């Protein structure tokens, strides 16, 4: 009998060790073909990955065709924004000529080290003016080619605070520019008029007026060239809209609340947006998640907001979003306080939140796949310093996708006796074995007493 018990113990231990293997429920290939040069790849996670992984993504593994793990960096997806700044291009005055009529011609040259110019600004202290400008470009100062045929600089501050002293240039690589300004003399009326009257007795028999005209030359302080530089900057986070698995609306008349039970697929949500046909309302609302306390499930608040809408004449204001810190759950509850007001009719509900990207450095000639969905996998610890350095230096990654999903991949863990002995499976097996041994001992003791 003792041999049988020992055999059972060994079988239970073997079963415990077998239970220590990692099982990934899903695998998807990385859709990438090598380009012949080193690349940094970005794999956006999608709804299928979110639905099958645990919170914090400890069960993501990137492996090559031989099943060898490949280090990766998981980061929150960030949006980008373009910022355009104006940079000066150094130049110098080459010549100034007064042409026929009231036209002046100014020739300027860019410094040798200056970038190509994208525009220029005419600086003048004058106000209330309007001038037409032509600009020509040249490489050598002899052959001139038209760049801008009919531009205007103006200042209408007598009427409105409107002015323009900038002129944009088309793309060019010219080093010299001829600026031709027409109507370089601005004619203005004097503020005082001279009035002459001829009287016969007390009767005015003749009246004349004379308006003094002043010709004011266009005073140019300087002309500066510039170019626009557009930089693409990363924002802190990019928000994604996620369709929900469903929602159900019920009315709690006793507590005067509308309850919306929401089903999702564990997307990394940070809020909900409600749609209703109602107008002109103001209702407090909270978002809750179910939390287990021992054997009891309680609802825990994670976010709140005041839902409001105001539509009156030209006023149109709405705030129908409720935000909260990032959560990944299957179920949420939204509670809207109605007080004595009629319940809001909810027509649609949308979730929004963060997105995540997996970045890694592939090796030429290898293929990769993403495994995910394990109840026992521990968070990996990878060296990601090289990937972070490339991102810091501004290297652009190549975006690739995930292929079709396949399932059930078992990966044995390295045998760890201490882990096995402390696992719940071994402790359960030991308890069963002890009960069996105790029962066998009692049976033998009973037989001896009968004898």
Image (cartoon, rainbow, N blue to C red):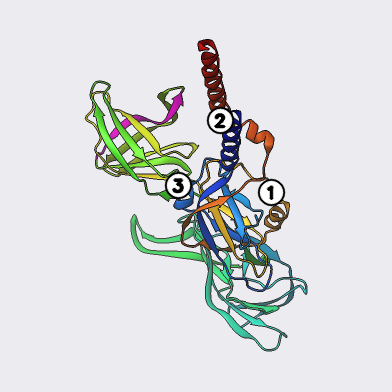
Q: Is residue 192 above or below residue 375?
A: below
Q: Considering the numbered disc 2 on the image, is that residue within a helix, a strand or a loop?
A: helix
Q: How many marks?
A: 3
- N-terminal of the pair, mark 3 or mark 1, is 3
State yes or no: discs 3 and 1 in contact (Cβ < 8 Å). no
Magenta stretch, residue numbers: 278-293
Q: Considering the numbered disc 1 on the image, is that residue within a helix, a strand or a loop?
A: loop
Q: Residue 309 location, x and y as percent?
A: 31, 38
Which quarter of the rendering shows the N terminus?
A: top right
Q: Residue 2 location, x and y as percent?
A: 60, 28
Q: Nearest to the eye among marks 3 and 2: give it.
A: 2
Q: Name which residue lies at 24% across and 20% down.
A: 254
Q: Nearer the viewer, residue 155 or 432?
A: 432
Which residue was labeled with disc 2? 429
Give residue 140's quadrant in the image: bottom right
- N-terminal of the pair, mark 3 or mark 2, is 3
State yes or no: discs 3 and 2 in contact (Cβ < 8 Å). no
Q: Is residue 386 above or below residue 365?
A: above
Which residue was labeled with disc 3? 51
Q: Which mark is residue 54?
A: none
Which residue was labeled with disc 1? 382
Q: Nearest to the eye among marks 2 and 1: give it.
A: 2
Q: Nearer the viewer, residue 15 or 263?
A: 15
Q: Residue 323 location, x and y as percent?
A: 44, 37
Q: CA distance from mark 3 to mark 1?
A: 24 Å
């Amino acid at each position: 009998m003792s041999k049988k018990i020992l055999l059972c113990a060994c079988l239970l231990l073997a079963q415990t060790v077998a239970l220590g293997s990692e099982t990934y429920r899903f695998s998807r290939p990385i859709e990438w073909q090598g380009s012949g040069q080193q690349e940094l790849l970005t794999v956006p996670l999608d709804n299928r990955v979110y639905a099958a992984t645990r919170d914090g993504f400890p069960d993501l593994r990137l492996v090559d065709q031989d099943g060898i793990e490949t280090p990766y960096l998981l980061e929150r997806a960030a949006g980008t924004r373009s910022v355009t700044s104006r940079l000066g291009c150094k130049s110098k005055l080459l010549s100034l000529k007064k042409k026929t009529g009231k036209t002046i011609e100014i020739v300027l040259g860019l410094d040798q080290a200056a970038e190509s110019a994208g525009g220029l600004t005419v600086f003048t202290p004058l106000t209330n003016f309007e001038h037409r400008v032509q600009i020509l470009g040249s490489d050598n100062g002899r052959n001139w080619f038209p760049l801008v045929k009919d531009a205007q600089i103006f200042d209408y501050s007598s009427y409105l605070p409107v002015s323009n002293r900038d002129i944009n240039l088309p793309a060019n690589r010219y080093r010299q520019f001829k600026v031709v300004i027409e109507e370089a003399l601005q004619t203005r009326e004097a503020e005082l008029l001279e009035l002459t009257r001829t009287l016969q007795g007390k009767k005015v028999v003749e009246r004349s007026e004379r308006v003094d005209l002043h010709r004011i030359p266009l005073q140019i302080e300087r002309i500066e060239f510039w170019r626009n530089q557009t930089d693409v900057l990363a924002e802190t986070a990019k928000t994604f809209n996620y369709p929900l698995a469903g929602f159900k609306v019920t009315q709690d008349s006793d507590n005067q609340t509308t309850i919306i039970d929401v089903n999702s697929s564990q997307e990394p949500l940070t809020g909900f947006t409600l749609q209703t046909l109602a107008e002109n309302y103001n209702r407090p609302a909270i978002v809750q998640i179910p939390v287990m306390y021992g054997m009891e499930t309680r609802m825990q608040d994670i976010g709140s907001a005041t839902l409001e809408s105001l539509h009156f004449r030209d006023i149109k204001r709405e705030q129908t979003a409720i935000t909260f810190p990032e959560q990944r759950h299957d179920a949420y509850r939204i509670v809207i306080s109605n007080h004595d007001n009629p319940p809001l009719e909810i027509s649609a509900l949308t979730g929004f939140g963060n997105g995540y990207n997996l970045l890694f450095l592939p090796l030429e000639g290898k293929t990769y796949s993403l495994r995910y969905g394990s109840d026992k996998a521990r968070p990996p610890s990878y060296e990601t310093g090289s990937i972070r350095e490339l991102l810091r230096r501004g290297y652009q990654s190549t975006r690739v996708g995930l292929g079709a999903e396949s399932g059930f991949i078992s990966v044995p863990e390295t045998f760890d006796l201490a882990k096995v002995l402390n696992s719940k499976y071994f402790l359960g097996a030991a308890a069963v074995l002890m009960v069996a041994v105790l029962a066998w001992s009692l049976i033998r003791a009973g037989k001896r007493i009968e004898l």
